[in-house]
Image (tube, helix red, strand yellow):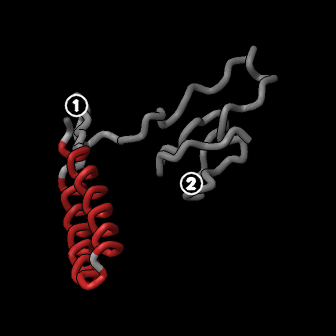
């Protein structure tokens, strides 16, 4: 099994064990509480340290990470009656960069534009 699953199971077992100690052995309640707090912190650090690290393969390191093209071709004469795909207000709502009609993503900041 995955190491993260084992860490999560160990966290649940530690919580259950602390609850049993709190109910059955109240004289050790303070110790059980502090051990549980320390274990949960260690467990979260271990979960964070064992997180999957994906790197995009086959991509240019200097390339943009947005999945959208920076611009799309202007609509043809047959599509002139259709509303623009995005960027119909003439500027990016995120960075205020002027953009031509029909642009799906801002060429400056890379945000996807709403279809207004």
Counting residues from the N terminus, which is met first, the one under dot 1 or under dot 2? Answer: 1
51 or 58: nearer the viewer: 51
Q: CA distance from mark 1 to mark 2?
A: 31 Å
Q: Residue 57, labelled with which disc?
A: 1
Q: Quadrant of the N terminus?
A: top left
Residue at the right extreme of this rendering: 81
Residue at the front extreme of this rendering: 24
Residue 52, x across and y down, in percent: 23, 43
Residue at the (71%, 32%) spot, across then down: 84
Residue 42, x across and y down, in percent: 19, 66
Whether residue 35 is situated above or below residue 10 in the rendered picture:
below
Q: Is residue 107 left or right of residue 113?
A: left
92 or 9: nearer the viewer: 9
Residue at the (62%, 27%) spot, across then down: 74
Whether residue 44 is situated above or below residue 50 in the rendered picture:
below
Check disc 2 and report the residue beneath it: 97
14 or 3: nearer the viewer: 14
The image quarter containing residue 83 is top right
Q: Quadrant of the C terminus?
A: top right
Looking at the image, is mark 1 or mark 2 nearer the viewer? 1
Residue 107, x across and y down, in percent: 49, 44
The image quarter containing residue 76 is top right
């Amino acid at each position: 099994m995955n190491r993260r699953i084992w860490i999560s199971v160990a966290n649940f077992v530690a919580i259950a064990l602390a609850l049993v100690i709190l109910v059955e052995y109240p004289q050790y309640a303070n110790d059980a509480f502090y051990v549980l707090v320390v274990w949960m912190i260690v467990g979260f650090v271990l979960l964070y340290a064992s997180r999957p690290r994906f790197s995009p393969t086959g991509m240019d390191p200097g390339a943009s990470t947005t999945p959208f093209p920076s611009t799309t071709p202007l609509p043809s004469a047959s599509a002139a009656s259709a509303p623009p795909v995005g960027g119909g207000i003439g500027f990016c709502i995120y960075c205020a960069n002027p953009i031509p009609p029909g642009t799906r993503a801002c060429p400056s900041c890379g945000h996807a534009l709403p279809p207004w």
